[in-house]
Structures are given as structure tokens and as C-alpha cells.
């Protein structure tokens, strides 16, 4: 039952992310084909500014843990705290918008439009964190709502007014607002409870020990700002245009999304759960990273022909995303078994906990990565070379993080146990990617057809060679047909 729960949650999150990948891909296609390279780079810069404005949402890390452990009052308490934190964050963002626009060479009107994001991001963070702890399925559903409305708003805007940078930002904002509505509905029972001061005090006291969780994102976000200020928005565009394809790879992490709350809610079977989670992620991380790397020029050409020469940057980014997905699983495994906060541990105990340890490592990786990118930006001035070498810096830092997390999680025996499966996944991935390469797709429908053909070939090879995949596929199909029979013949479930 534990295994099924883990897989169902993981599959739901992955399907939601896969749906988001498709709809998000069309959204990015609309944006890249309507914005010039400089405006697309400005979009990436503004996204980074928003991540700084929303930095205090890190307190909701504890909302997930408290709600997963059964504390329903964590929802309304987190919502109130987020609303309080959002007010100064929004005011500061607006006050600094003019200076940011001038220093980073981005349009002031676009920065001002993005200010509306800030309070919405804070509210969504609290609601999503609680939903993920209480009912991960609905957290995944909210992501589907976000992606659907975002794309619909962009398509409507294209037909009515055309797309510029401000319209693109407003389309994404519409998606966030729709997600807010979906999350409120999923937490309607929790939202009837009053916030509790003791819960708020606990969240705030624990958050001091969690400061390392916000530092890495603040530091790593400097990469885009450094490239924008020291090189150009064009280089930012080359550096960030690969993100949709990185997501295609890194979203494989969400197959393990049920691991963290499962480890928090119960104790036992840690090694088994980690084994299953890593296998699920590798099942798709390997083929997606190899596939993206092999047909990188084709994928970028479809976005916009002038991006096709960024293929080296995309290849490096694809493998970075695969390693990051594995790092996410290992970090969840290490933090999921921690009990210091749930058992009433104080500040000093938390500072010694696995939670802070993992976040400190992430902080060190971010410092190393940004320092390397600063050196690259100062040394190289060619926009294309800066983008490629900067992605290489992140790849090196992420690999080092993988080695350390593997040691801390005691995962080397698990990886040795998965060696045969990994070899099958890798060889099958190269075979499937070769088919896509030979097809040489240059149009959207050709890329989709090549991807479907390669995925089908990959699945067929695994079905023949990997007993675990065969058993999992059989169980999934059996469960699907069982549910279909139940819906088609409701009386069959009656005594």
C-alpha cells in the first residue's frame, strides 16, 4: 500500500508537470515568436527579480511539515503570515522598480506590471505548501489549472491585442490567480479554522533555522542579474531559452514527489522508498536528458531559428537538470527522516538537523556557481560563449552536490542495486534518441511525432528487458481497467 501511494502521488505530479510542459511549451513558443531576443532576456531578468521579492515565502517550508503531520490550523496561520510578509515585500519591489529598470536595462512598464505578482506569490505559496502536506493530489491539480489558464490567456491576448512583454506577464499572472482559486477550494475545510498564535510562533521560531533554504535561491538568482548587467540581455536570452527543455528533464523529479510527505508521516521502509523513488526518476530523467541533448538544435530551431546555435548550452543544461532531479530525491530522503522539529526540538537541535545540513550544502553550491559565473561574465563578453560556459559551471557544481548528498543519504548501496536498471535505461535512451536524430524534425508536429515515436520505442525496449518496468506497467493497466469497470458497472461494487 505504501508503494502504491508513493507511485500514485508521483505519477499524478509528473502528469501535471508533463501537461505543464506541453502547455508551457506552447506558451513559450508564443512568447519567443512574438518577442525579440532582448525582450525575451528582459522577461528572464524580471522573473529573477520576482524571486527576490518572494524570498520570505521560505517560512512555508514548515507549513508543509506541520500540515503533513496533521495540524490543520497550519493552513490559515500560514495564510495570515504570508499576507503580513507580502505587504512590505510589495512596497519595496515598487519602490525599487525604477532603479532596477535602469540598472538591468529592462522596460519600467514591465517591471511595474510584475509588481502585481508579489502578493499573489505569497498567498499561493502558503496555500500550495499546505495542500502539498495535506493532499498532494490537489496540489498537482492546481498546477494543471495554472498552466491551462496561462496558455488560454496568452492565446486570447494574441488574438485580441498581440503579445508584448507586458501582455506575456499578465497572462502568467492570470494563471497564478486561477491557481489560487483552485487551492482555496481544495483547502476549504482547513480555511474554516481560525489561525492559531502558537502555530505562528512555532513557524517563525523554526524559520530561523531554515534561513539556509532561502540563501541558495537568492545567491543562485544572481546568475541572470550578473549576465544582464555585465554582458547583455541577449546573453540572458541565450542562457534562459533552454529553461523549458531543462524543465522537461528536471520534472522527472516529481515522480518521487510522494517520498517526502510519506517519510514525514510515517517511519520505516526508508531504503525501500528511496530505491523506488530513484528508480522512478531515473526511468524518465535519463531518456529525457539524452533525447534533449541529441536533438538540441532541432528543438531550439522550432522555438525560433536564430536560437538553433545555442545547442551546446542546451546540451549542458539538459544533463545539469538530470543531476538536479536526482539531487532533489536525495535531499527529500535526507530531510524526510528528520524528526527534530516534529518532536519539539528547539533552535539548537534544528541547527544540528539534517534539514539545515542539506540547505547549507545547497548554499555552498550556489556560492560556488555564482562565483564561477561572475568570473565568466568578467572574462568573456561574447553572449553565446558566456551562456554556454555559465551552464557548464552549474553542471560541475551540481555534480559535486550529487556526490555529497549520496554519501549523506547512504545511497551508494541503493545506486549499486539500480546499476542494471540504469544501464538498461541509458542504452534504451540512446537507441530511442537516435531515431529522433535520424528523423531530423524541424517543425512542431515533426518534433511531437519524433518524441512520441522515441518514447514508444523506449517503453517497448524496457518492457522486454526490465522486469520492474513490466510489473509496474501491468499493475498500472490493471488498476486503470479495474476503475473503468467500476464506473461502467456501479452495481458491481454493491454487496
Image (tube, rainbow, N blue to C red):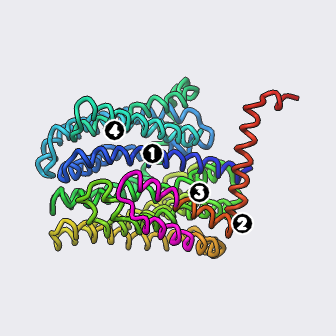
Residues at marks 2 and 1 touching, judged by CB atoms closer than 8 Å: no
Indicate whether 106 appears above or below 414: above
Q: Marks 3/4: CA distance?
A: 36 Å
Mark 3 vs mark 2: in front: 2
Q: SS class of the residue under badge 1?
A: helix
Q: How far is the residue under mark 2 from the one under mark 1? A: 30 Å
Instruction: Assess disc 1: are there few (<14), some (14-19) or many (≥20) residues with their C-alpha within 10 Å of its C-alpha.
Output: many
What residue did someone put label 1 on? Answer: 20
The mark closer to the camera, 2 or 4, is: 2
In the foreground, 310 or 2: 310
Closer to the chain start, of discs 2 and 1, is: 1
**Quadrant housing the C terminus:** top right
What's the distance in space between the residues labelled 1 and 3, CA to CA?
32 Å
Question: Sequence order check: which comes first, mark 3 or mark 2?
Answer: 3
The image shows residue 299 at horizontal and vertical percentages of 36, 59
Give the residue number, with chain letter if any, for mark 3.
338
Disc assigned to residue 467: 2
Instruction: Determine which residue is flagged by label 4.
Output: 172
Quadrant for residue 305, please give it: bottom left
Badge 4 density bin: few <14, some 14–19, many ≥20, Cα 10 Å: many
The total number of labels drawn is 4
Q: Is residue 104 left or right of residue 392?
A: left
Residue 402 shown left or right of residue 33 in the figure = right
Query: Between disc 4 and disc 1, whose residue precedes?
Result: 1
Q: Give the label, 3 or 4, closer to the camera.
A: 4
Amino acid at each position: 500500500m505504501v508503494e502504491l501511494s508513493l507511485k500514485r502521488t508521483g505519477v499524478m505530479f509528473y502528469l501535471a508537470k508533463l501537461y505543464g510542459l506541453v502547455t508551457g511549451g506552447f506558451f513559450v513558443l508564443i512568447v519567443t515568436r512574438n518577442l525579440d531576443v532582448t525582450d525575451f532576456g528582459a522577461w528572464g531578468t524580471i522573473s529573477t527579480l520576482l524571486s527576490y521579492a518572494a524570498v520570505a515565502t521560505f517560512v512555508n517550508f514548515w507549513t508543509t511539515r506541520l500540515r503533513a503531520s496533521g495540524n490543520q490550523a497550519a493552513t490559515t496561520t500560514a495564510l495570515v503570515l504570508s499576507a503580513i510578509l507580502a505587504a512590505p515585500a510589495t512596497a519595496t519591489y515598487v519602490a525599487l522598480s525604477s532603479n532596477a529598470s535602469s540598472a538591468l536595462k529592462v522596460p519600467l512598464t514591465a517591471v511595474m506590471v510584475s509588481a502585481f505578482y508579489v502578493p499573489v506569490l505569497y498567498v499561493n505559496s502558503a496555500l500550495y505548501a499546505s495542500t502539498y502536506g495535506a493532499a498532494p493530489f490537489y496540489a498537482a491539480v492546481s498546477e494543471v489549472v495554472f498552466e491551462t489558464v496561462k496558455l488560454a490567456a496568452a492565446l486570447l491576448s494574441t488574438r485580441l491585442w498581440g503579445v508584448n512583454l507586458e501582455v506575456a506577464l499578465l497572462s502568467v499572472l492570470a494563471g497564478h490567480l486561477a491557481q489560487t482559486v483552485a487551492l482555496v477550494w481544495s483547502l476549504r475545510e482547513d480555511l474554516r479554522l481560525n489561525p492559531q498564535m502558537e502555530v505562528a510562533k512555532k513557524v517563525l521560531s523554526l524559520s530561523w533555522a531554515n534561513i539556509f533554504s532561502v540563501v541558495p535561491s537568492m545567491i543562485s538568482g544572481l546568475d541572470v542579474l550578473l549576465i544582464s548587467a555585465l554582458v547583455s540581455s541577449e546573453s540572458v536570452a541565450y542562457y534562459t531559452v533552454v529553461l523549458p527543455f531543462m524543465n522537461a528533464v528536471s520534472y522527472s523529479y516529481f515522480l518521487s514527489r510522494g517520498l517526502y510527505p510519506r517519510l514525514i508521516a510515517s517511519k520505516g521502509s526508508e531504503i525501500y522508498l528511496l530505491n523506488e523513488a530513484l528508480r522512478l526518476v531515473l526511468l524518465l530523467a535519463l531518456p529525457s536528458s539524452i533525447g534533449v541533448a541529441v536533438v538540441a538544435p532541432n528543438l531550439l530551431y522550432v522555438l525560433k531559428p536564430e536560437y538553433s546555435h545555442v545547442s551546446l548550452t542546451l546540451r549542458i543544461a539538459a544533463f545539469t537538470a538530470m543531476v538536479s532531479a536526482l539531487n532533489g530525491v536525495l535531499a527529500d530522503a535526507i530531510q524526510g527522516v528528520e524528526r527534530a522539529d516534529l518532536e519539539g526540538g528547539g533552535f539548537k537541535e534544528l541547527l544540528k538537523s539534517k534539514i539545515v545540513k542539506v540547505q547549507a550544502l545547497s548554499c555552498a553550491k550556489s556560492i560556488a556557481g555564482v562565483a564561477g559565473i561572475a568570473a565568466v561574465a568578467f572574462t568573456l563578453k561574447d553572449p553565446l560563449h558566456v551562456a554556454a560556459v555559465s551552464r557548464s559551471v552549474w553542471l560541475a557544481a551540481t555534480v559535486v552536490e550529487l556526490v555529497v548528498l549520496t554519501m549523506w543519504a547512504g545511497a551508494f548501496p541503493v545506486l549499486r542495486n539500480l546499476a542494471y536498471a540504469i544501464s538498461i535505461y541509458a542504452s534504451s535512451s540512446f537507441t530511442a534518441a537516435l531515431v529522433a536524430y535520424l528523423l531530423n524534425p524541424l517543425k512542431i508536429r515533426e518534433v511531437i511525432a519524433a518524441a512520441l515515436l522515441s518514447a514508444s520505442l523506449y517503453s517497448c525496449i524496457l518492457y522486454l528487458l526490465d522486469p520492474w518496468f513490466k510489473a509496474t506497467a501491468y499493475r498500472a493497466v490493471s488498476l486503470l481497467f479495474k476503475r473503468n469497470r467500476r464506473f461502467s458497472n456501479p452495481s458491481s461494487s454493491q454487496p
